[in-house]
Amino acid sequence: MNVLEGKLTGAEDIKIGIVAARFNEFIVSRLIGGALDGLKRHDVPEEQIDLAWVPGAFEIPVIAEKMAASGKYDAVICLGAVIRGATSHYDYVCSEVSKGIASVSLQSKIPVMFGILTTDNIEQAIERAGSKAGNKGYECAVGAIEMVNLMRVMEK
Ligand SMILES: Nc1c(NC[C@H](O)[C@H](O)[C@H](O)CO)[nH]c(=O)[nH]c1=O
Ligand SMILES: CC(=O)[C@@H](O)COP(=O)(O)O
């Protein structure tokens, strides 16, 4: 059996685009820190990482699509924190952001990582932004490297 896998080494030439939502910046800034930590610890040079801020998670897909279509990046990491409020707005934002990001990844044929926290309260978001439930930004960074290297293996 042949196992195709994306290793976490050989990331020195990987170029990453990050799209981050400014809404709940207190949380998102920690997701960005986790992503940068993950990329740096796997030897992705800082000068090969671009960060684009958008107002909120709903605006992430359109900028993720521009990054992916530019041909400048091997992968795009989408970071945001959607925290439930008093109305159904949360459901619409979460639904459209997840559909949008998935669509960009399939259309552009490069990894577009879903680093959007969708939580019922701020405590759950804090837990997933660098405390007891890990850091979704770090997870997406390492996942991006694995996916880029897996796709390179499959294209040989
Ligand atoms: N409530 C949250 C939002 N809402 C804003 C939308 O994402 C969007 O920017 C607005 O509707 C204008 O188009 N965004 C988040 O990222 N997180 C939230 O909790
Ligand atoms: C996720 C949201 O859009 C939400 O934070 C908005 O809050 P509300 O539903 O109270 O307007």
Image (cartoon, grey):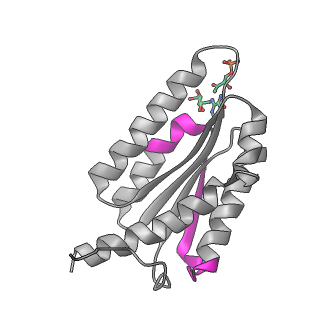
- Residue 109: name its quadrant: bottom left
Regarding ligand 2, which quadrant of the image does it lie in?
top right
- Residue 54: name its quadrant: top right
Left or right of residue 12: residue 151? left
Q: Which residue lies at the image location 58% right of the left edge and 19% below the top edge?
A: 89
> Quadrant of the image for the N terminus?
bottom left
Residue found at the far top of this picture: 87
Q: Which residue lies at the image location 40% right of the left edge and 67% below the top edge?
A: 147
Q: Which residue lies at the image location 38% right of the left edge and 75% below the top edge?
A: 149
> Percent from the top left, x then y, of residue 75?
43, 64
> Percent from the top left, x then y, of residue 122?
76, 35
Q: Which residues are magenta?
A: 41-61
In the rendered image, is residue 118 in sight?
yes
Instruction: From this view, report whether residue 153 is shown above or below residue 62.
Output: below
Residue found at the far front of this picture: 1
> Percent from the top left, x then y, of residue 101?
42, 44
> Quadrant of the image for the C terminus?
bottom left
Please tell me how many numbered marks the rendered image carries. 0
Instruction: From this view, report whether residue 102 is shown above or below residue 52.
Output: above
Instruction: From this view, report whether residue 65 is shown above or below residue 17.
Output: above
Q: Which residue lies at the image location 38% right of the left edge and 74% below the top edge?
A: 6
Q: Is residue 153 magenta?
A: no
Give the camera-side residue of 2 and 142.
2
> Percent from the top left, x then y, of residue 11?
48, 81
Q: Is residue 54 magenta?
A: yes
In the rendered image, is residue 73 in sight?
no
